[in-house]
Amino acid sequence: MTITKKGKFGRFGGQFVPEVLMPALEELEEGYERFKNDPGFKQELDYYLQDFAGRPSPLYHARRLSKKYGLKVYLKREDLVHGGAHKLNNTLGQALLAKYMGKHRLIAETGAGQHGTATAMAGANLGLATEVYMGAKDTQRQRMNVYRMELMGTKVIPVTSGSQTLKDAINEALRDWVSNVEDTHYLIGSVVGPHPYPTIVRDFQSVIGNEVRSQIVEKEGRLPDSIIACTGGGSNAMGIFHPFVHDTDVKLFAVEAGGSGLKCTDKAALHSASLSVGEEGVLHGARTRILQDPYGQILESHSISAGLDYSGVGPELAYLAETGRIIAKNADDDEALAAFHELSRMEGIIPALESSHALAYLAKAADSGDLGEIVVINVSGRGDKDLETVLEKGAPL
Amino acid sequence: MRISEKFGELKDKKEGALIAYVCAGDGDTVGIVHSLVRGGADIVELGLPFSDPVADGPTIQASIQRALDAGMNPDTYFDMVKGLGVNVPLVVMTYYNLIFKRGLERFVTDCRDSEITGIIVPDLPPEESGELAGYCEQHDVDLIFLVAPTTKGDRLEDILKRGTGFLYLVSRLGVTGARADIALSTKEVLDRVKTDKPRAVGFGISSGEQAAEVVKSGADGVIVGSAFVDIIASGQDITQRLEELAREIKSSLG
Ligand SMILES: Cc1ncc(COP(=O)(O)O)c(C=O)c1O
């Protein structure tokens, strides 16, 4: 057998991981191919998505926002999913898959704690031992999320290596997996990492876009003109975009965190806009766009929203951006904050700071005519977790 | 010197190879390498530090961090290696992004020009290695592959075919780092991996006693890293102790 390249989106993606993990990735791919169309698996996952996660999530016509911007704005309400974000769609899917594959331990990385919390929920519900790696800095910044995870029986392991944030938590989860690959499933939280993760996570998150499709057709009798989603690793974006990729009349906007400016210092970027201004490189198992220095050392990223604060982006997004199918944009910390306050006051919905970047792009682009008439924005999560951060920033302008 | 020559020479002398790993830029690298060679290291594997070393355990991670903090980068690395002046094969160990960013061919010719005769990339499985392997072949640099305890079947055959220089057998699941217990899985891997190419075992070996056992089980050499790096980290009598440990291990491989 000559091994051929697997899991590529154009030249992006692939499997750049230690040899020890290659058989595990192969096993995961086989397991996924075997169960994804298995009626029993699908039925069980649908059941959890409905009765445990609370799906389908509504597609809400934001009337006051629509009026202000002179467009018809629909909000996909992932903030109403159990746990307060889209993250559970993926963790339920992968945890169930792990169970079908005979694994009894889950590990995951988390930045702010959203994916960790969603993994803890799925792990507790499905009876799988769960351990979550979290940068030591993040465990301090997000104490309540650590406690939430612990309440659900998850062990949270602070990571003290490197910059002690999300990318180091991923490194440490990979090291754990290398050591315990036989009985453990690594439950990655976004459309990143080596093949088959970007595909698996995208598929499990596609429930978002599939629902939008039937909901918008029911409400409007047609597809939207544009869809806007915030993009860190890119799972809520790929989840809502994927079912529309072939509908080329629907514009797809991936909004990254512009942080405090699209600049870099020696060791860190002041933003997380790897799709917009990053360079090609290899990080966490995939060839994609990343933030790096001239030698290829990975730069730390920055965003007011922990969930977007990542130095890479999913390889499929890198590919779709290069082909022009999706359009990479960004919104900075201040614009996101303004949008956070605006949605809270105008619609009575407090969005996650991550999602606020997507909302901020509406404000930036509404006048340009680029968005068309009907716009769907993915409200990937609710903002309760961000109140402290917002409070620190003071009152809205 | 090419790696195959070295293994040929050692075979004639019925000696196992000691392959010593240290990370460039952590301490006085030139002095460190010379003391390892004085102690009997047959091949020196010189790490080029990367910010996100997923295959490494805490000891080597910390070494990499010290090297980065001290300003080590690929330009400095190749300059330094050019002036090393040791008469053993040199191997660079680094992660793929640094190679990718520099440009695959440029990286390989930089190796050739600084007398590095082998490349180890712990996050580059054979599936992704074709392009780099092409340049390595063109410029006479070995591309050394890792074989893990989990590598089996067709993939194992494929790696055995592709690997040049030597095969790097990983003794156990996990990351780099010294361990007391390595015997069982090592024997299992050696029994399974059948090839004419030299086989060196690494990950976890820290003493002459362990090294002797590994070579007795059929390996052509051992790779020792964390045990040397521990000495560097301690900051105490570094060159003298490195030389002593290298000598202790090397003398057990006869
Ligand atoms: C609410 C919310 N939205 C978005 C993200 C970003 O992740 P992704 O880009 O994978 O959707 C996160 C990550 O934690 C999140 O919690």
Image (cartoon, coloured by chain):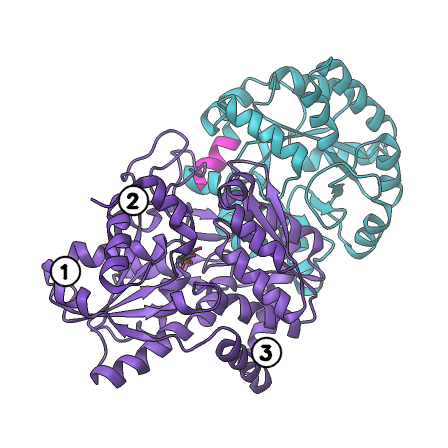
Residue A152 seen in the figure = yes
Element type at mark 2? helix
Amino acid on which disc 3 is placed? Arg
- Quadrant in the rendering for residue B248: top right
Amino acid on which disc 1 is placed? Ala
Residue A382 image position (x, y, % from top left): 38, 60
Marks 3 & 2 on one chain: yes
**The disc numbered 2 marks a residue on which chain?**
A
Q: Is mark 1 within 8 Å of ligand 1?
A: no
Q: Residues within 10 Å of mark 1 (few under 14, many from 20)?
A: some
Q: Main secondary structure of the magenta part?
A: helix
Mark positioned earlier in the residue sequence (1 or 2): 2
Q: Colour of chain B?
A: cyan
| B160 w.r.t. B84: above or below | below
Element type at mark 3? helix
Mark positioned earlier in the residue sequence (3 or 2): 3
| Region in magenta | B103-111
The answer to whether the residues at label 1 and label 2 have Cβ atoms under 8 Å apart is no
Amino acid on which disc 2 is placed? Asp
Marks 1 & 3 on one chain: yes
The residue indicated by pointer 3 is A34
- Quadrant in the rendering for residue B150: bottom right
The residue indicated by pointer 2 is A333
Disc 1 versus disc 3: nearer the observer:
1
Q: Is residue B231 left or right of residue A267?
A: right
Which chain does purple denote in the image?
Answer: A
Disc 3 versus disc 2: nearer the observer:
2
Element type at mark 1? helix
| A115 w.r.t. A140: above or below | below
